[in-house]
Amino acid sequence: MNRNRRTVADMQAMKGKRQLCKLNVRTPDEASGAAEAGMGGVWR
């Protein structure tokens, strides 16, 4: 069976090798929440 959906393990293995998503934050609270969630490269 061909698996098209990525698992958490697949995405963790790709970290630093490929951009998986882009996040735009508008408030310091959103930026803080994204940082706490482990989103890399969060800029204010």
Image (tube, rainbow, N blue to C red):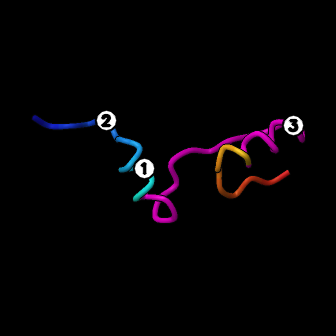
Q: Secondary structure at mark 1?
A: helix
Please state which amino acid type lies under the numbered disc 1.
Answer: Met
Q: Residue at x 87, y 37 (%)?
A: 29
Instruction: Give the spatial CA distance, label 1 vs label 2.
Output: 10 Å
Q: Which residue is mark 3?
A: 29
Q: Which residue is mark 1?
A: 11
Q: Is residue 10 left or right of residue 27?
A: left
Count the labels in the image: 3
- The tag earlier along the polypeptide, 3 or 2, is 2
Q: Are marks 3 and 1 in contact (CB under 8 Å)?
A: no
Please state which amino acid type lies under the numbered disc 3.
Answer: Asp
Q: Secondary structure at mark 3?
A: helix
- The tag earlier along the polypeptide, 1 or 2, is 2
Camera-nearest label, 3 or 2: 3
Q: Point out residue 2 in the picture as x, y percentages from the top left corner.
A: 14, 37
Q: Quadrant of residue 34?
A: top right
Q: Residue at x 89, y 41 (%)?
A: 28
Please state which amino acid type lies under the numbered disc 2.
Answer: Arg
Query: On screen, 18 above or below 11?
Result: below
Q: Which residue is mark 2?
A: 5
Viewer-closest of 14 and 22: 14
Q: Point out residue 22 in the picture as x, y percentages from the top left corner.
A: 62, 45
Q: Secondary structure at mark 2?
A: loop
Q: What mark, if any, has residue 30 been given in the picture?
A: none
Q: Point out residue 26 in the picture as x, y percentages from the top left corner.
A: 85, 36
